[in-house]
Image: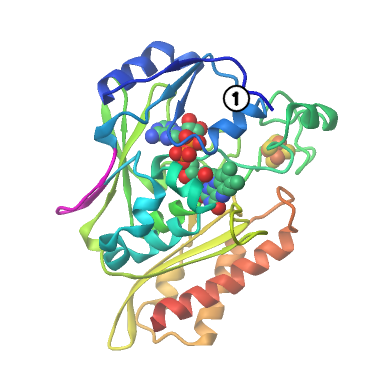
Amino acid sequence: MSLPEFKLLRPQTLEEAVGYLAKHASNIRVLAGGTDLIPSMRQRLFEPEYVLDIRHVAELKGIRQGPEVEIGALTPLTAIEHSEFLRQHYPVLAEAAATVASPLLRNMGTIGGNICLDTRCLWYNQSLTWRKGCGFCIKKDGDLCHVAPGGSKCWAVFSGDTPPALLCLDAQIEIASSTRVRRIPLREFYTGIGDSYRRLEANELVTRVFLPAASADYRGVYRKLRIRGSIDYPLAGVAVALKRSNGHVTDARLAITAVNPSPMLIKGAAHMLEGKAVDALLAEAVGDVAAKTAKPLTTSALTPEYRREMIRVFTKRAVLAAANS
Ligand SMILES: Cc1cc2nc3c(=O)[nH]c(=O)nc-3n(C[C@H](O)[C@H](O)[C@H](O)COP(=O)(O)OP(=O)(O)OC[C@H]3O[C@@H](n4cnc5c(N)ncnc54)[C@H](O)[C@@H]3O)c2cc1C
Ligand code: SF4
């Protein structure tokens, strides 16, 4: 499949990049690693007039330690996976990054691209010919949903691996445009709506991720379901970060991905775990709560029932692994 025609813009600085975004906001797409954008453009899901290739903006690369940890949006997932500092102090993030796609894709793919990743659906991530044959849907060019016929909402699924880990770490993101820089908790970035899944204006760029010092040194585990272990997007994913003292949990965070239109923190998990010594019964009870929060539909090749069940199973295993590590 060939790429549609577009004009390539290659800024060298952040100022130049947001300037281009301001000028062409109505018809532009940001390219970071391009590992998701380029296949989507080949499938004619996006046909922007301009592509903003930000790969040469050096100030958006790298992991900086300080009172809080700062990760540039252009930092490759490989750098996060292999960072000794992150592996030691923020293990859930390094572990989640290590499960994304394949080594080659992690060399190209960035943390900013992973956070901004488009939602996915069996009926959407297809060629133009395929989509035309089946009938276009709400997310692109149509007005019906094949997954929930009769409804007017798109349920395409957020399928990134690092955002649930970042949610567990209480991460914030910085967003820049030519007129302002804002900083928000990552949990406020996602909308829960498949076809407008992120709160990002067309003239804005995600520039940095911040990890608070208070989230350091939590035991962390990430578990994911996928068809091919070596390369696939998650079809269900669970991240857990917890702290223990004297064998009892003092704080816990749990988040799921790939089963809803946004990655989600599981409310109530912390309350269930805090002050307790974790055993199989308790881990199973937390798994039940996570499975109730998961709302998988027929957006992928695996059945919703199986994906929900795997959220239950992975939550139990992840909680036990984090508590016993
Ligand atoms: C075969 C295959 C398997 C994959 N498996 C996985 C997987 O297991 N887990 C997973 O999480 N992902 C997977 N991916 C998707 C992708 O490789 C990763 O999500 C990667 O992190 C995307 O980063 P990128 O820099 O390449 O993003 P790009 O493709 O460059 O961009 C992705 C989206 O984010 C936007 N964007 C990128 N950076 C910014 C920014 N700084 N500010 C604003 N918008 C931005 C782009 O405009 C685009 O809409 C897979 C992809 C392929 C092709
Ligand atoms: S959930 Fe429905 S509207 Fe959304 S991409 Fe899938 S088929 Fe289209």
Q: Residue at x 24, y 34 (%)?
A: 59
Task: Provide the residue designation for mark 1.
Answer: 46
Q: Residue at x 59, y 15 (%)?
A: 5
**Count of numbered circles in the view:** 1
**22 to 205, vertically: above or below:** above
**208 to 167, vertically: above or below:** above
Q: Residue furthest top?
A: 23
- Density class for disc 1 (Cα within 10 Å; few <14, some 14-19, many ≥20) is some
Q: Which residues are magenta?
A: 61-70
Q: Residue at x 38, y 54 (%)?
A: 166
Is label 1's Cβ within 8 Å of ligand 1? yes
Classify residue 59 as left or right of residue 199: left
Magenta stretch encompasses residue 102: no
Magenta stretch encompasses residue 65: yes
Q: Residue furthest left?
A: 67
Q: Secondary structure at mark 1?
A: loop
| Front in this rendered view, residue 289 or 317 | 317
Instruction: Give the residue type at disc 1.
Output: Phe
Camera sees residue 303 = yes
Camera sees residue 190 = no
